[in-house]
Image: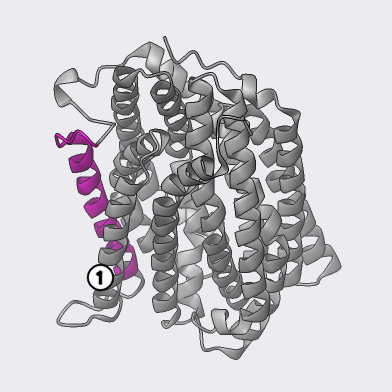
Amino acid sequence: MPEEVSSKYVYRDIVRIAWPSLVELLLTQLASMVDMMMVGQLGSAALSAVGLTTQPKFLLMTLIMSLNVGATAMVARHKGAGNKEKAFLILRQSLMLNTIIAVLMTVIGIWAAEPLVIFMGAQEDTVKDATIYLQIQMAGFISIGITSSITSCLRGAGDSRTAMVYNVTANVVNVILNYLLIYGKFGFPRMEVAGASLATIIGQFVAMFMAVYAVMKKNDKQYLQLHIKDGFLPDFAALKDIVQIGLPAMMEQLVMRAGMIIFAKTVAGLGTVSYAIHQVCMNILSMSFMLGQAFAVSATSLVGQSLGKKRSDMAKTYASRVSSIGFVFSFILGMVFLLFGEQIVSLYSNETEVIETGAVMLRYVALVQPFQGAQFILAGALRGAGDTKVTAMITFLTVLLVRTSVAIVLINVVGIGLSGAWIAVAADQLLRSTLVFLRYRGGKWMYMRLKPEN
């Protein structure tokens, strides 16, 4: 740590950015868990139907998510360099680009919904519900494009509190409407799986309107501001900066989605009940991601801003301190999964087979927790530095090759069923954590040049 900087100063900066992100992500995932729990009361077929739409939806989101990585890194660099107007420009260009992409993905998603869920391995009892769920999700896709653009730019500027407010509000709306629309309470129609999907997109539109309002209102405390009068015409220099970082991130996301789709199809071959159990455990695993992702927001923002100020020593200090915090919290979370697996799974279903088998799968989740938390954070630091090519290569090796091949061999050749899938998840996470740590220790990320002054 630099001599002129105290540990208190470093930890204060980390927590200032991480805690709103943690609250937001935890509540977002809790809303997703409540969604699954409510759908779970409709039976295993309904759970599987919703689960089968996850990977197609994320596949269609890939380009937006990737470009957001570039926007986050560039806003952080511009803020560190003291160039506010350039940061504003990145926000406008990101919004313009993601809105166009979102409209295109909406058309594709609605048209191809049924072929996509059939490709994912939907059984005869799940095709109809899965198709309807995905089509409704895609109808609200533009809200994801706009909101995620604003969120990524705010986080690059170190403002995670604003995103927390509108995303938490959206989750509250989602949960309330879930209750009303899934079961048909208080005079609302009973829509079951379709109701869960509709509740989600209404919540997403609430977040979109709040996000746009947040960056448009005149507020001296708000660093990022959206000025409509400045226009949304393409600025090719700014777009080049976004794409320069976002393109490797896109390859990483495409590779990840390809791996996850092959993995999900392999598990779907075990039948509706096994896939329902798997989906419950994947939902719980996603909950465990939240700690790492929240602190990764801190790492991305603080590393990017430090490098913008040409302070690689501070960038390294922030990254190492954040990863230490993440390791400790993830270890504690792993112990919770290990000791209370049955109680957690029973929140989703009252079927004995689901509860008992799901608790066994959570032991694998518990095993990887400490390493997974540190991996998320260090990968966030690398992305904040603009080092996205290597993380893409690591994802290719671990998700597309290791996870899928291990799962296929253990499920289809060795024949150990669902356990084979979760051994594959553990192998993927442990190897990925090791490779990300080695890249971070190599130190090349501290000297990435993104030219934020241009």
What residue is shown at x 37% (from left), y 62% (from top)? 133
Q: Is 363 or 283 nearer to us in this picture? A: 363
| Identity, as a three-letter code, of the amino acid under mark 1 | Leu
What residue would you read off at disc 1?
177
What residue is shown at x 14% (from left), y 81% (from top)? 187
Residue 196 on the magenta span: yes
Q: Position of residue 201 (x, y in %)?
A: 29, 57
What residue is shown at x 64% (from left), y 59% (from top)? 328
Note whether residue 254 is visible. Answer: no
Q: Quadrant of the N terminus?
A: top right
Magenta-highlighted residues? 195-221
Q: Is 250 or 372 nearer to us in this picture? A: 372
Image: 425 above or below 189: above
Q: Position of residue 368 (x, y in %)?
A: 71, 60
Residue 73 on the magenta span: no
Q: Position of residue 381 (x, y in %)?
A: 58, 36
Q: Position of residue 344 (x, y in %)?
A: 55, 79
Task: Tell me the SS state at disc 1.
Answer: helix
Q: Is 111 or 251 nearer to us in this picture? A: 251
